Image (cartoon, coloured by chain):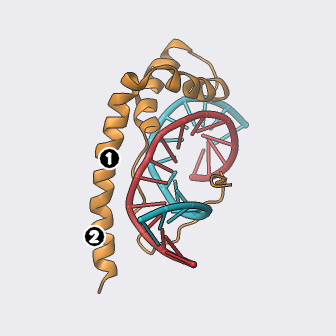
Chain colours: A orange, B cyan, C red
Amino acid sequence: MAAERKKASRKKKDPDAPKRSLSAYMFFANENRDIVRAENPGIAFGQVGKMLGEKWKELTAEEKTPYEKKAEEDKKRYEKQKAEYAKKNSS
DNA sequence: ATGATGATTGTTCCG
DNA sequence: CGGAACAATCATCAT
């Protein structure tokens, strides 16, 4: 059970909670929401949401590359934020 | 050094 | 306004 996260009820633990970064999915979804929803006018999230995930992996490493790439830069963004958090943490 | 954990991220959709 | 599938994440802690 190395990976059994809960889905709801996530609480915070840090005082500042530097949060983390986004995920490739977030970047990918940013584009898909435009496309998927545009191609499926009127379909509920029940379909779109699931459909998105399917396609996501469907693409290919090259397709997700732009998303992963963005996620990678986003992480840096988080690093910084955390830096301040850790800094302020240290009196 | 290593493993396991948790917390988080954003989308869509609706009542 | 929030929640839930969908996926990735990946920094951090603890031992």
Label ID, residue A84? 2
Q: Which residue is mark 1?
A: A74
Residue type at numbered disc 2 = Glu
Quick check: do tags 1 and 2 share a chain?
Answer: yes
Name the quadrant containing residue B13. Answer: top right
Q: Position of residue A8 (x, y in %)?
A: 66, 54
Q: Position of residue C11 (x, y in %)?
A: 38, 61
Residue drawn where x is 33% and y is 50% of the image? A75
**Along the line of sight, which residue is nearer the eye, A37 or A26?**
A26
Q: Is residue A47 above or below residue A91?
A: above
Q: Which chain is mark 1 on? A: A
Q: Is residue A89 left or right of residue A11?
A: left
Task: For the N terminus of chain A, give its image quadrant.
Answer: bottom right
The residue that appears at 31% across and 83% down in the rendered structure is: A90
Q: Position of residue A22 (x, y in %)?
A: 41, 46
The residue shown at (65%, 51%) is: A7
User: Distance of mark 1 from mark 2, alpha carbons?
Assistant: 16 Å
The answer to the question of whether label 1 and label 2 lie on touching residues, with beta carbons closer than 8 A, is no
Mark 1 and mark 2 lie on one chain; the one further toward the N terminus is: 1
Find the residue positioned furthest to the bottom.
A91
Q: Nearer the viewer, residue A23 or A39?
A: A23
The disc numbered 2 marks a residue on which chain?
A
Q: Secondary structure at mark 1?
A: helix
Q: How many marks?
A: 2
Element carrying mark 2: helix
Q: Is residue A32 left or right of residue C1?
A: left
User: Which mark is on residue A46?
Assistant: none
Q: Give neighbour class at mark 1: few <14, some 14-19, many 20+ (Cα, 10 Å).
A: some
Crowding around mark 2 (Cα neighbors within 10 Å: few <14, some 14 to 19, many 20+) is few
Q: Amino acid at mark 1?
A: Asp
